[in-house]
Image (cartoon, grey):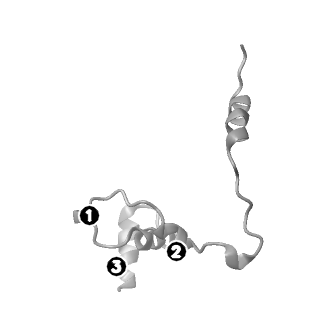
Amino acid sequence: MHSSLISVLTRHLEDAAAPCPPTYPYELATLAEVFDHLPDPRRIRGRRYRLGSLLGLCLVAVLGGARSLAQIARFAADRGA
């Protein structure tokens, strides 16, 4: 029996209930809200900063041209508190 990836995905999507996207811009979640709802895989003892804040800082650093963790760290250090 021949089975393509598309037919497999189609079978799985038939049962999935996709919610309608928001119709108004004010119904959309902000990026900070999305980041804050992500599960944090770090141990509680190792958490110094909120995950959402770290991801936002990394995103801005990469958009600003950072290409490594060292450059992201320098970007963060240059910004201060």
Badge 2 vs badge 3, beta-carbon distance below 8 Å: no
Label 2 vs label 3, nearer the camera? 2
> Disc 2 marks which residue?
32
> Disc 1 marks which residue?
44
User: Residue at the left extreme?
Assistant: 45
Residue 67 image offset from top left, x and y in percent? 46, 62
Q: Residues within 10 Å of mark 3 (few under 14, many from 20)?
A: few
The image shows residue 53, relative to residue 67, as above or below, that is below
Q: Residues within 10 Å of mark 1 (few under 14, many from 20)?
A: few
| Residue nearest the viewer, comparing 70 with 11 | 11
- The C terminus sits in image quarter: bottom left
Tell me the residue at 52%/74% (across/down).
32
Separation of residues labelled 1 and 3 (CA atoms)? 23 Å
Residue 54 image offset from top left, x and y in percent? 40, 70
> Disc 3 marks which residue?
77
Separation of residues labelled 2 and 3 (CA atoms)? 21 Å
| Residue nearest the viewer, comparing 76 with 39 | 39
Residue 64 image offset from top left, x and y in percent? 52, 73
